[in-house]
Image (cartoon, rainbow, N blue to C red):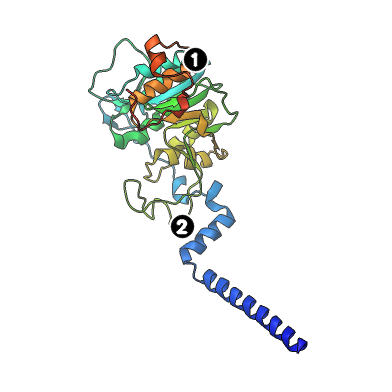
Amino acid sequence: MRVTSKIYTFGSIFLCLFLVATVVSNFKSSETTRDRSKRDIKSKKIVANDFIPEAFFRERQHSGKTTTPSFSEDTLLHSFKCPETENDLVLVTTNARNPQKLHRRFYSKYPVEVRFLIGFTEDPLPTDFDDYVIGSYNETYENLYLKTGSAFEFVSKCGLSKQKVTMVDDDTIFYAGDKMPDEDIVCGYRLNSMTEKMTTGKWALTEQQWPSGVYFPGYCGGACKTLSAETMKNIYSVSIRYSNNNVTFEDLMYTGIFRVMAGLPTPLHAPELCRHYNGNYINLNWGMHLYLKENGLEDFSEEESRRYPLSENSKMITAGKTRL
């Protein structure tokens, strides 16, 4: 009787193991070809770091023709003033209608120089400031790729070498008083890694632009990034030599594809470097104000002190909630 019981027990265990193995096998075999392709690509480390399709290695053809009045397509810059010191540089992506005075006031408290990237526009600019880097492209959202390229050309044309250069949108704070990571490229908003192309929407790419099932290289996405001047010059050299294969996703091209082609490492992610306010300039203003107060660089009025307790942290102000 005991022998029969043991046989029955072992048989039950064997049957359970067989059923589990069958379920696992069926689950694995149900993976789609796309899922298997993802795993294979990841295991080969093709795109996570260093794979760039051959189409991007076609050398650019420069015609030298004029695309807008008095501007050549071989430069993205119209007028600019180079930094006069070796202080770090902040490049603010903006347009003529958005406020620049908030950034001038904020960054004047720190040993940095600030410049505003802006495209060719008929909107008047203040004449009492010489901190605009005016591009040879029209000021449109579709030309954001060119505006980003103008930042890399500006750093190269000015011969910068020792500076750290932070690129921010005009609704974003770069916490200039905080200690900077000692890396050549730092993503202060988002590091996109192991991402694939979109097939619909404004960032959709065709098969000719980027092959399906192949990951993009890591790149800095969004409103804030810091690069060494030498890194920007290396990337710029690649960008003017090789084709962008009609890909105009500026973050991907400059801190991803051109970065890899220049032989530069994957960026570091440091989300505490900046704060993006999603177009809410009221909260941007108060975020800057509170940060300066916390660092002993600006005092509140008596009324402001009552409305905004000192215990309130500037980095905790939400982007969506209007405070005034």
SS class, disc 2: loop
Please tell me which residue is depicted at 47% across the width and 32% down the height of the picture.
Answer: 236
287 relative to 13, above or below: above
| Residue 167 point in image, percent of width and height | 44, 28
Q: Which mark is residue 213?
A: 2
Q: Secondary structure at mark 1?
A: loop
- Callouts 1 and 2 close, C-beta under 8 Å: no
- Whether residue 187 can be seen here: no
Q: What residue sits right under mark 1 in the picture?
A: 110
Q: Quadrant of residue 145?
A: top left
Quadrant where the N terminus is found in the figure: bottom right
- Above-or-below relation of 297 to 120: above
User: Total number of numbered labels?
Assistant: 2
- In the depicted structure, whether residue 275 falls above or below residue 256: above
> At 55% from the left edge and 60% from the top edge, which residue is drawn?
40
**Is 68 left or right of 303, judged from the image as shown?**
left
- Residue 156 is situated, as x and y percent measured from the top left of the image, at 47, 25
**Vertical position of residue 1 compared to residue 292: above or below:** below
